[in-house]
Image (cartoon, grey):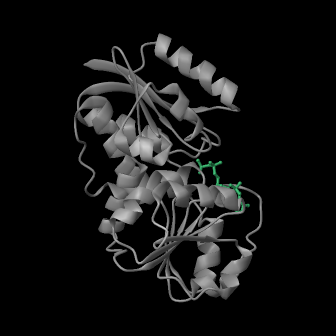
Amino acid sequence: MEKKISCVFGKPIKHSMSPILHNSFGKKNNICLYYKAINIRNKILLKKEWIKFVICGGIGVNITIPYKQYAIKLANKLSYRAKIAGAVNTLIINKKNIFGDTTDGVGLIRDLNRLNINLLNKRILLLGAGGAVNSVIQQVLDLGPNKIYLVNRTLLKCKDIRNRFNLKNIIQFCSYDELKNKNAFDVIINGTSLSIKKDKINFNNNAFKTTIAYDLMYSKYITKFLKFAKNNNAKIYDGLGMLIEQAAETYFLLNNIRPKIKNLHKKIRNLLNNNDKKKYY
Ligand code: ATR
């Protein structure tokens, strides 16, 4: 049996379902994969752990919150989609290169497809302007929305995204405060890390009426953002499906085998809900 080492770096990371997904894909493909979740307290430690990982002969890693934008510096070759995103969630060690890629956008699109959520000609509200949003915005644009409103506490980051994509008629931005003057959106996607923080939600609920709300985050319990959305009559979805889809894509990049993920969503949801991670592999 082939032995391979891989991991996911992030903070917080305890809740991560990535080890379950990757290790179970490996098991099914006869690869003895050692995939661990490693909590990284700061950027300096990320670099240190990464070097250790390379020396240990690892094949590649996943990068998650809050290091997706910083980790791009660890790569010396980037996929087109990582270049556009300015962020990576995957680093692959080749003989000569560290190849950086992002599979988040593909993961989101495949999950929206699975959920029959159509963005064509829709008014989209995209919350946040960090690594998560940068990683998915190109793929959201590819689905042909009528408008994407970017909202972030730090508006400069929204401005930067809009300038980079140069689609001023489609991408607009405003502050959380200005949301009260906006009509309801068709789909609201949360790409902030609000749901994993103690911070309270304090934005206007006008935007939410009769809409679909999707959180790029997932959790055992309903996320703070989705609870708020549900209380405002939105139909809600979390990012567990996106996680599964992006994990499958990253696994494919790392191992050159496409794992079967049909019928996996319910199983992974049950494991998450029952805190039963160890039983799976
Ligand atoms: P990630 O890689 O997950 O995107 P990140 O780059 O640190 O992590 O970005 C976190 C995002 O969540 C940012 O858009 C951040 O807003 P700022 O850029 O203004 O900091 C957003 N965020 C974090 N906490 C938030 C909160 N309490 N309310 C609203 N947005 C929040």
Position of residue 168 measured from the top left corner of the image (x, y, whole percent) = 49, 68
Is residue 32 positioned above or below 111 on the image? above
The quarter of the picture where residue 114 lies is bottom left
Please report the residue visible at 66 percent of the width from the left and 67 percent of the height from the top. Answer: 224
Is residue 196 positioned above or below 2 on the image? below
Left or right, residue 162 beside residue 80: right
Is residue 150 positioned above or below 164 on the image? below
In front here: 245 or 20?
245
Point out the quarter of the image occupied by ligand 1. Answer: bottom right
The quarter of the rendered structure image containing the C terminus is: top left
Please report the residue visible at 58 percent of the width from the left and 46 percent of the height from the top. Answer: 15
In front here: 134 or 11?
134
Please report the residue visible at 23 percent of the width from the left and 32 percent of the height from the top. Answer: 256
Can residue 225 be seen from the camera position used here?
yes
Looking at the image, the residue that sits furthest to the top is 55
Position of residue 44 measured from the top left corner of the image (x, y, whole percent) = 68, 25
Q: How many numbered circles does the render carry?
A: 0
The quarter of the rendered structure image containing the N terminus is: top left
Left or right, residue 272 beside residue 105: right
In front here: 143 or 268?
143
Position of residue 107 measured from the top left corner of the image (x, y, whole percent) = 37, 54
Is residue 95 positioned above or below 179 on the image? above
Left or right, residue 151 beside residue 79: right
Position of residue 265 measured from the top left corner of the image (x, y, whole percent) = 36, 58
Can residue 269 be seen from the camera position used here?
no
